[in-house]
Amino acid sequence: MKLQQLLSMVRRCDADFGLTADGDRIAVGLSGGKDSLALLYALAAYRRFCPNKYELCAVVIDAGAGADFSPLDPLCQSLDVPLHIVRTEIAPIVFEARKEKNPCSLCAKMRRGALDGKLNELGFNTLALGHNADDMVETFLLGMMYEGRLNTLQPKSYLDRSGIKLIRPLLYVREKETAAFVKDVGAPIIVNPCPANGFTKREVMKSVIDKMCDVTPDAFERVHSALTHPERNNLLPIKE
């Protein structure tokens, strides 16, 4: 995937859901994975023609698991994006002190708290995360199959405690497309050292989607289209 194609999808998501506003100070939550790297490239380039002018930086939450984030510094310099690395002890707390059997929820809350704190310190009002179209469909299936409720990732929302605006500009982009993009540009992917990586319920949903597509090849596109066009919903009315 080329940058122009990626920008086209980000621009459409912004136009459809009003993600950016003039004067926004946007911090990319940069993990060093393919999705956050693609988002960084896209928002750095989008500054040139976005109708809303915004400031951009990148924030890395070092969970203390031993990841090497040093390759991200020259990359951010080349994109003219200031980089901030927040050192934490999230991994030792989750895996050693707490010994969590299901660590993802606690880890996500602690990482989000660290991100919120850094954004408040920097005076940035918007957090951009690299969730993609696959994440959106997987979240929908997870909620339906494990919790019995219909919900998915929102393109734009506001964090209750901090009031920070949360945006997800990649919700029209497939995971395979972000992977192709970062490979094409030679971006430095940071390996995720988390012991739970690859062993979550989200991985189960990936296999469910694969099986759905074996039966109906365009099943993913149909589900994604249903989620991004809520006017097509025809669910039962709320009980009085």
Image (cartoon, rainbow, N blue to C red):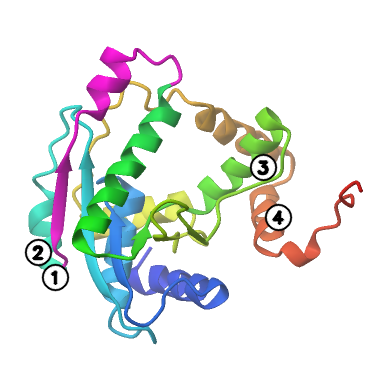
The mark that comes first in sequence, 4 or 1, is: 1
Residue annotated with mark 2: 77
Task: Please state which of residues 234 and 33 is positioned toward the viewer in this rendering.
Answer: 234
Determine which of the numbered discs, if any, sits on residue 165 in the image.
Answer: none
Q: Secondary structure at mark 1?
A: loop
Q: Could you tell me how far apart the alpha carbons at marks 4 and 1 are, in whole angstroms?
A: 38 Å
Residue annotated with mark 4: 222
Residue 40 percent across, percent down from the top left? 28, 61
The mark that comes first in sequence, 1 or 3, is: 1
The mark closer to the camera, 4 or 1, is 1
Crowd tier of the residue under label 3, counting other residues whose Cα lies within 10 Å: few below 14, some 14–19, many 20 or above: some
Crowd tier of the residue under label 1, counting other residues whose Cα lies within 10 Å: few below 14, some 14–19, many 20 or above: few
Q: Secondary structure at mark 3?
A: helix
Q: Residue at x 24, y 46 (%)?
A: 32
Q: Secondary structure at mark 2?
A: helix
Dots 1, 2 in contact, CB < 8 A: yes
The mark closer to the camera, 2 or 3, is 2
The mark that comes first in sequence, 2 or 3, is: 2
Q: Residue at x 48, y 26 (%)?
A: 200
Q: Which residues are magenta?
A: 80-102
Residue annotated with mark 3: 213
Dots 1, 3 in contact, CB < 8 A: no
Does 200 appear above or below 70?
above
* Residue type for callout 3: Cys
Dots 4, 2 in contact, CB < 8 A: no
**Which residue is most to the right?**
240
Residue annotated with mark 1: 80
Dots 2, 3 in contact, CB < 8 A: no
Q: Could you tell me how far apart the alpha carbons at marks 4 and 2 are, in whole angstroms?
A: 40 Å
